[in-house]
Amino acid sequence: MDGFKNREGNPEKFLIIHAKTGGGHYIASRSIENYIKENFRIAEIKNVDGLKNAFFPYPLMPFLWDLLSEIPFLWRIVFYSSNIKKIYKTTLLIQTLLLYPSLKRLIKFYKPEVVFITHPFYIPPLFKIKKKLKINFFLITVLTDFGEIHESWLFEGSDLLWIPSKYTYNEIKNRIKNIKFDILGYPVRKDFLKRKKLKKDRVLLMGGGTGRGPIFEILRILTEEFRDLKITVICGKNKKLHRKIAKFLQIRNLENIELIGFTDKVAEYMRKSKFLISKPGGSTVAEAVYTKTPLIAIDAVPGQEKGNVKFLESINAGKEITVIREIPDLIKKIVQGEIKFTFKEDLTGYEKKKRELFEKIIWNI
């Protein structure tokens, strides 16, 4: 941690900057915030949305992400075209121009000594703030996906790049030759780190905190094929989906289906499940791997979610299904032992390195 060698005393002010473009960036930021609060109570921490007070159109990015993720071919165009060198350079200029003023106000107001960011939008303007204003804070960029890593994450402005897995490192190692990095696992909530074994007697069906994806259609297919299969469905904050499924269960008189709205007990439900059916967002994939719950990935958007699927399949921790009618056949193969999941990369193995990183920061070792 060379950035602290000239400081007097221990760093006390931490700023975490997230973006609500998908749930993973925010969940990762909260996990880091809670980790510091629970383990190093001397620190002052602020966790803020860096897009909220930025110039147009950045405050609309959460809405635009929700829209584009429902139209995969449009998101494919946005994701891959913005990875082309000439277009990417233009994007960098726009990001710096439109995000610089609001981020400068944040930095001047909070005066942090360490800044964590869980979205790549912030790297160029924060790098400019450090150089132009000569403000010395240590910038840690936390990758929140496992594969198909966009070029924007690898801009040479971070003091440390937090890489979630060896698989991710192998994908990007030729693109980060001038960037300091470490493989530290994924910042998951503490419940997912517990070594707690529960009886696995059900299937878990969910679509993240917002209950996205063809959840109802999959549930209907599963109840047609497996009358006695015990299923837990988590709808998150999607009240419309919750009402629709509740009515369906009442009409069909299905008592083996457990219907849950928003819950903070996802880790417990994962540990009770033989496997999980969900969209492969970064945080969901990480949580499944940490709890060793095989993931049947559905409705993956091009780019980062397809990259997360590649990670899952490379470590034998899940399978992707692109036609939901094929899910019952896959389930039969899993139950009959034709398909076994071995979880070749254990993300919990990086927890000691993560602890050492925070100790170096906090205690200035």
Image (cartoon, rainbow, N blue to C red):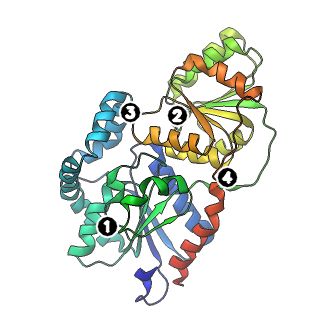
Q: Is residue 220 left or right of residue 6?
A: right
Q: Amino acid at mark 1?
A: Gly
Q: Nearer the viewer, residue 227 or 322?
A: 322
Q: Amino acid at mark 4?
A: Asp
Task: Give the number of the mark in front: 1 or 4.
Answer: 1
For mark 2, give the secondary structure.
loop
Q: Would you place residue 306 above or below residue 193 in this image? A: above
Q: Nearer the viewer, residue 206 or 169?
A: 169
Could you give the CA–CA distance between mark 4 and mark 3, rounded to whole angstroms?
28 Å
User: Sequence order check: which comes first, mark 1 or mark 3?
Assistant: 3
Q: Is disc 2 surrounded by few (<14), some (14 to 19) or many (20+) residues within 10 Å?
A: many
Q: Is residue 231 left or right of residue 365?
A: right
User: Sequence order check: which comes first, mark 3 or mark 2?
Assistant: 3
Q: Residue furthest right?
A: 199
Q: Which residue is mark 3?
A: 69
Residue at 44% across / 90% down in the picture?
8
Q: Which residue is mark 2?
A: 279
Q: Is disc 1 surrounded by few (<14), some (14 to 19) or many (20+) residues within 10 Å?
A: many
Q: Which residue is mark 1?
A: 157
Which of the image's four quarters has the C terminus?
Answer: bottom right
User: Sequence order check: which comes first, mark 4 or mark 3?
Assistant: 3
